[in-house]
Amino acid sequence: MFRLVGLRPNFALDVSDEEMAVMGRHAAHWQRYIDSGQMVFFGPVLDSTGSWGLGVVEADSEDEIVAFAAADPVVTTGIGWIEIGKTLGAFVRPTASRPVPADRAG
């Protein structure tokens, strides 16, 4: 998973036209994971601290995601940064490639 942090707490609420153009390139940058179905969630979050972005990606390699995030236009233009994390375990919805195990099927 990754957290995109902008330069300001309310970045998503007061984004400039120039920053919006970068955000468009940011979304296009991650499109391959969306198209492949590996992106579980991708979008802005508002909470008591302000706004930030969240992406949840199914990937085989953390190094792949770290390198890909480093090339994100948000990072390369300096309008924000990306923090990478991973889950140690999670409850994940079943999919065609990951069906419910027979011993847990209802």
Image (cartoon, helix red, strand yellow):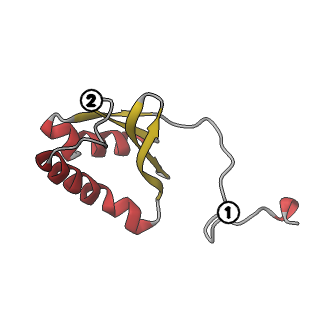
Q: Which residue is mark 1?
A: 94
Give the vertical position of 42 relative to 97 (above or below).
above
Mark 2–mark 1 CB contact (< 8 Å) = no
- The residue furthest front is 14
* Picture disc at residue 61: none
Q: Residue 30 location, x and y as percent?
A: 31, 56
Give neighbour class at mark 2: few <14, some 14-19, many 20+ (Cα, 10 Å). Answer: some
Q: Residue 60 location, x and y as percent?
A: 47, 50
Numbered-mark total: 2
Label 2 vs 1, first from the N-terminus: 2
Give neighbour class at mark 1: few <14, some 14-19, many 20+ (Cα, 10 Å). Answer: few
Q: Nearer the viewer, mark 2 or mark 1?
A: 2
Q: Residue 27 location, x and y as percent?
A: 28, 56
Is residue 96 shown left or right of residue 50?
right
Q: SS class of the residue under badge 1?
A: loop
Instruction: Locate residue 45: give its quadrant.
Output: top left
Q: Which residue is mark 2?
A: 8
Q: Residue 48 location, x and y as percent?
A: 48, 30
Looking at the image, which is closer to me, 44 or 106? 44
Give the vertical position of 3 relative to 35 (above or below).
above
Q: Amino acid at mark 1?
A: Pro
Looking at the image, which is closer to me, 48 or 75? 48
Looking at the image, which is closer to me, 45 or 72? 45
Q: Amino acid at mark 2?
A: Arg
Between the residue at mark 2 and the residue at mark 1, the CA separation in whole angstroms equals: 37 Å
